[in-house]
Image (spheres, helix red, strand yellow):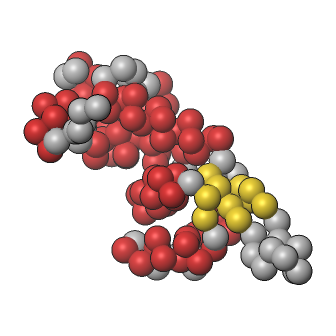
């Protein structure tokens, strides 16, 4: 089995449009940049506890409502509940909705799929126009 090198990743252009893909994902799903990157981290470790979540938040801006918001919005789900005797704490995992978003981001990075701009059509604010233009450029540059 061949191992990926940094040159292979550079040749793929995997991170070329990461910033605009992240902005698109955040705007269309009402997430902050920190929320999205934390969800990507949690998806990579698969199952986690609330303590793992706290360890993952050390490199992000402090937001004491992040856990409850992600849980309430369905980005994180309980995989196993605690029962106070043998299982001392809940075990969580990212939801199917989150896994689908992250997979879609990877497909877009690899050029297998385009970012839709339909969400940005009827908004005339400067930020949306600039983001739409950047998305169109990223979609053409594959």
Q: Position of residue 35 (x, y in %)?
A: 49, 60
Task: Quadrant for the C terminus, please.
Answer: top left
Q: Residue 104 versus residue 120: which sits nearer the camera?
A: 104
Depicted 112 relative to depicted 68: above or below: above
Q: Residue 76 versus residue 117: which sits nearer the camera?
A: 76
Farthest residue to the front: give it: 1
Q: Residue 57 versus residue 125: which sits nearer the camera?
A: 57
Q: Name the residue rendered at 24%, 33% in the picture.
A: 2
Q: Residue 46, located in which quarter of the rendered image?
A: bottom right
Q: Name the residue rendered at 47%, 53% in the picture.
A: 44
Q: Residue 130, located in which quarter of the rendered image?
A: top left
- Compared across the picture, whether 12 is left or right of 54 comes to left
Q: Position of residue 45 (x, y in %)?
A: 51, 58
Q: Residue 108 versus residue 6: which sits nearer the camera?
A: 6
Q: Position of residue 118 (x, y in %)?
A: 47, 25
Residue 47 seen from this side: yes
Q: Name the residue rendered at 78%, 79% in the picture.
A: 88
Residue 121 seen from this side: no
Depicted 76 relative to depicted 142: above or below: below
Q: Name the residue rendered at 36%, 29% in the picture.
A: 108
Depicted 85 relative to depicted 82: above or below: below
Badge count: 0
- Compared across the picture, whether 85 is left or right of 117 comes to right
- Compared across the picture, whether 102 is left or right of 95 comes to left
Q: Position of residue 39 (x, y in %)?
A: 51, 56
Task: Quadrant for the N terminus, please.
Answer: top left
């Amino acid at each position: 089995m061949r191992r990926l090198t940094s040159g292979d990743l550079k040749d793929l252009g995997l991170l070329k449009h990461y910033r605009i893909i992240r902005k698109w994902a955040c705007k269309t799903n009402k997430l902050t940049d920190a929320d999205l990157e934390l969800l990507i981290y949690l998806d990579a470790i698969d199952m986690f506890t609330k303590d793992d979540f706290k360890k993952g938040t050390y490199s992000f801006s402090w937001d004491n409502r992040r856990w409850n918001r992600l849980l309430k919005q369905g980005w994180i789900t309980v995989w196993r509940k605690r029962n106070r005797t043998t299982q001392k704490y809940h075990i969580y995992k990212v939801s199917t909705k989150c896994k689908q978003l992250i997979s879609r981001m990877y497909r877009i990075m690899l050029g297998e799929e385009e970012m839709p701009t339909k969400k940005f059509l009827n908004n005339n604010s400067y930020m949306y126009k600039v983001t739409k233009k950047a998305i169109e450029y990223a979609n053409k540059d594959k």
